[in-house]
Image (cartoon, helix red, strand yellow):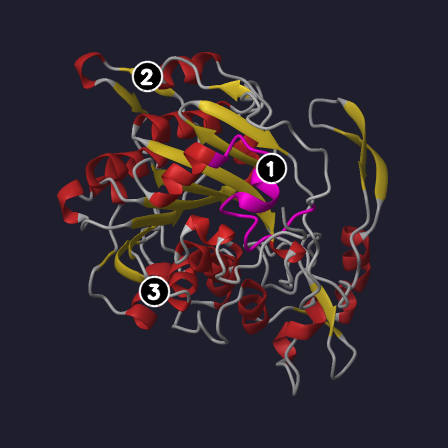
Amino acid sequence: MGLDTVELFAGVGGFRLGLEEAGHEVIWSNQWEPSIQAQHASDCYVKHFGADDHTNIDINDVPTEDVPDHELLVGGFPCQDYSVAQTGAEGIEGEKGVLWWEIERITRAKRPKYLLLENVNRLLRSPTDQRGRDFAVVLHCLHDLGYNVEWRMLNAADYGYPTKRRRVFIFAARRDTDWGGWLDEEADQPHYFTQRGFFPREFPVDSGQQQFPVARQPDTELLGDPKQTSEEFEFDFEHAGSMVDGGIWTRDVDPIDIEGETLGDVLQTGGVDDEFFLDEEDMDRWEYMKGAKEEDRVTDDGYEYTFSEGAIPFPDNLDGPSRTLLTSEGTTGPGREKHVVEDPETGDLRILTPIEAERLMGFPDGWTDTGMSRTWRYTCMGNALVVGLVEQMGRTLTQSPDDLDSDSGLVFGSTSE
């Protein structure tokens, strides 16, 4: 059964596309791009989904009562400094403008059954001078609101998608729900992160790794309150983990690679406009930018140092998944991180087209062809998530967690217990 869903930081609708394909319904959404007048992502969202129940204002300015009651809250929120402060009678709160606290505010008021959130993988280790602090604050807030949590760092390329994109997905289940109760009972058991959890059902990992004893003790625990966690907590979170009643279990897992699409599979055939092809006169500069370097350099204040970096394939390999798509794609001027491919029809070198960028992220062809500039089309895709990953998670949300032990035919992991 599908869930009534609220989508925050909606971008051009990646979460919505994936969840609706899995049978869920988005009943309200918000997208706001700060510091610019043109709201290209929101305009794109409205073109495809309509303006009803969509807002294009700063989420900080949205009254909580304007957000409808819902069962699932989703969004890809920025990785920021999540430090907290004690504010007397007002209790614990974070710095104004940090968008995690808007998720916390809405969750506190609406109490959805589930949250499904996405962030860059460095969230698990930030900030550098207190590793793991920011993620622990997120976990502590969810703990205080009555949720159990499971997370997983996923690389889309490991599961058959044509691009390498590593992101942390956070699944939070209210403790009185079926998934919340499942975490209570199962998260400290062997095989949880390889078979029995929320994520391994669609994203299998090697089940033959080192086994933990039954009902093992937490690897660490949250501290007394979010403020103490903010000030004192430090821990190396692994790529998979859970938080139940303040206890934290975490481990690294090895994905079972699934062969799928490659960069070559998404390239357009039948002719690409000349504007996407590289100028021959720039080729030496391209070679330099993409090549390995070890150079003596001097800073403006006279400090001498050796600069070094490895080579990047030029052109990109078409027989595997692409490198991570960036927001800076889309111009033919030399650039180290830009994708350059050999055109399948002419054999000449060119950048990716907007349609190819959309295909890499799992969007329909022309999704961002809504009147925005070409540069913004790449920016929107560079900020997007891989739609198919969300669809897979959405499918798991339509299942009961104990379907694992039923005759439902649910397939998970590489072996069975």
The residue carrying mark 1 is 239
Indicate which disc residue 85 carries: 2
Vertical comparison of 50 with 57: above or below: below
- Mark 2 vs mark 1: in front: 1
Amino acid carrying label 3: it is: Tyr
Q: Are marks 2 and 1 in contact (CB under 8 Å)?
A: no
On the image, which quarter does residue 249 sit in?
top right
Q: Is residue 244 magenta?
A: no
Indicate which disc residue 279 carries: none
The residue located at (49%, 36%) in the rendering is 186
Indicate which disc residue 45 carries: 3
Q: Are marks 2 and 3 in contact (CB under 8 Å)?
A: no
On the image, which quarter does residue 58 sit in?
top left
Percent across and percent down for residue 360 are 59, 65
Mark 3–mark 1 distance (CA, rounded to whole Å): 31 Å
Percent across and percent down for residue 307 are 80, 34
SS at badge 1: loop
Q: Is residue 192 magenta?
A: yes
Q: Which residues are magenta?
A: 186-206
Local packing at callout 2 (Cα closer than 10 Å; few below 14, some 14-19, many 20+) is some
Q: Nearer the viewer, residue 175 or 53?
A: 175
- Mark 3 vs mark 1: in front: 1
Amino acid carrying label 2: it is: Ala
Amino acid carrying label 1: it is: His
SS at badge 3: helix
